[in-house]
Image (cartoon, grey):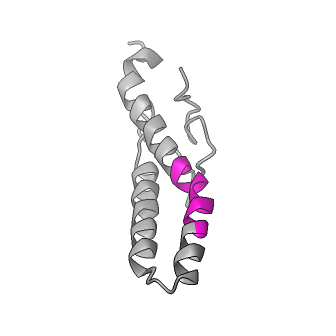
């Protein structure tokens, strides 16, 4: 019996790539968030809603990324032991790449 090819995993690998990209966009927009918070605080505005929304979005994307499973080995794709590595482009366990 032969192992399935990487092409058979395309749909799952695409979802893995999308979940990583979402977290990276959230991470890279942090300077915009800081600028917005500084402007709102400077104007005396309440920033609680913005802080909660950004934290919830960031946490949701992080959880989504951390629960993604490799289609080949069925282990967590981005998590080796306890820590999420968002810079990883291959499975932490079997080395399967999500890049085409």
Q: In the displayed structure, would residue 11 be above or below residue 16? A: above
Which is more toward the observer, 90 or 37?
37
- Is residue 78 shown in magenta? no
- Is residue 28 shown in magenta? yes
Residue 91 spot, x, y in % from top left: 55, 37
- Number of dots carrying numbers: 0
Q: Residue at x 55, y 25 (%)?
A: 99
Which is more toward the observer, 40 or 50?
40
Residue 80 spot, x, y in % from top left: 57, 51
Question: Please, what is the dominant secondary structure of the magenta stretch?
Answer: helix
Q: Residue at x 46, y 53 (%)?
A: 66
Does the image show residue 31? yes
Does the image show residue 5? no
Residue 71 spot, x, y in % from top left: 40, 32
Residue 30 spot, x, y in % from top left: 59, 61
Q: Which residues are magenta?
A: 24-35
Q: In the displayed structure, would residue 92 be above or below residue 97? A: below
Q: In the displayed structure, would residue 100 be above or below residue 32? A: above
Q: Quadrant of the N terminus?
A: top left
Which is more toward the observer, 53 or 89?
53
Q: Residue at x 38, y 31 (%)?
A: 12
Q: Residue at x 38, y 18 (%)?
A: 8
Quadrant in the rendering for residue 4 = top left
Q: Is 96 positioned to the left or the right of 1 in the image?
A: right
């Amino acid at each position: 019996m032969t192992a399935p090819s990487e092409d058979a995993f395309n749909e799952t690998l695409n979802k893995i790539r999308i979940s990583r990209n979402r977290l990276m966009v959230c991470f890279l927009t942090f300077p915009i968030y800081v600028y917005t918070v500084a402007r709102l605080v400077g104007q005396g505005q309440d920033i609680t809603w913005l802080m909660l929304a950004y934290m919830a979005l960031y946490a949701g994307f992080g959880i989504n990324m951390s629960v993604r499973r490799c289609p080949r080995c069925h282990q967590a794709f981005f998590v080796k032991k306890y820590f999420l590595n968002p810079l990883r482009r291959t499975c932490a366990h079997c080395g399967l790449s999500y890049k085409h």
